[in-house]
Image (tube, grey):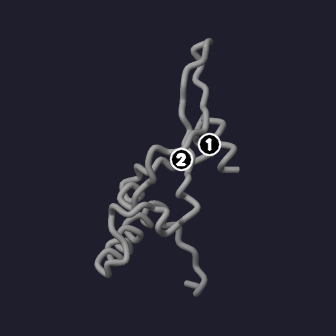
Amino acid sequence: MPNDAVFRVHSMTKPFTSAAAMMLMGEDRIQLTDPVSKCRPELKTRQVSVPSANELTRIVHAAALAERQPTIQDLLRHTAGFAYGEITTNPLVKQACT
């Protein structure tokens, strides 16, 4: 096997990332309740996509400030609200991901 062999680990990065986060918690460098903006300040004023129905009962999306900042725990549980732009039908998310 060559030294520069590439392995496709796909979702196996999640346990490694979670273990790294737990190590940082053990060192009192982060807490699960810390906002993500503690590490990534650009996420402090994050916008979210808010769906609503228009007069034709079609769903339209508008950008709005998030009601709260996502936390480290939200990231680990995959509940922080991040989406894959290539699999969404939301045009705002698609545009943000390109």
Question: Do residues under tags 2 and 1 come within 8 Å of each other at their CB atoms?
Answer: yes
Residue at point 53%, 66% (across, down)? 40
Identify the residue position indicated by label 2 in the image: 83
Structural distance between the alpha carbons of marks 2 and 1: 7 Å
Q: Earlier in the sequence, mark 2 or mark 1?
A: 2
Quadrant in which residue 34 is drawn = bottom left
Residue lying farthest to the top in this orientation: 56
Q: Residue 13, relative to residue 52: is it above or below?
A: below
Q: Which residue is mark 1?
A: 93
Left or right: 13, with 1 as reference point? left
**Position of residue 11 measured from the top left corner of the image (x, y, whole percent):** 44, 60
Q: Residue furthest left?
A: 26
Q: At which x and y percent is residue 75?
A: 42, 58
Tell me if mark 1 has few (under 14), some (14-19) or many (20+) residues whose alpha carbon lies within 10 angstroms of its own: many
Q: Nearer the viewer, residue 17 or 82?
A: 82
Q: Amino acid at mark 2?
A: Ala
Of 48 and 18, which appears nearest the observer?
48
Q: Position of residue 94 (x, y in %)?
A: 65, 43
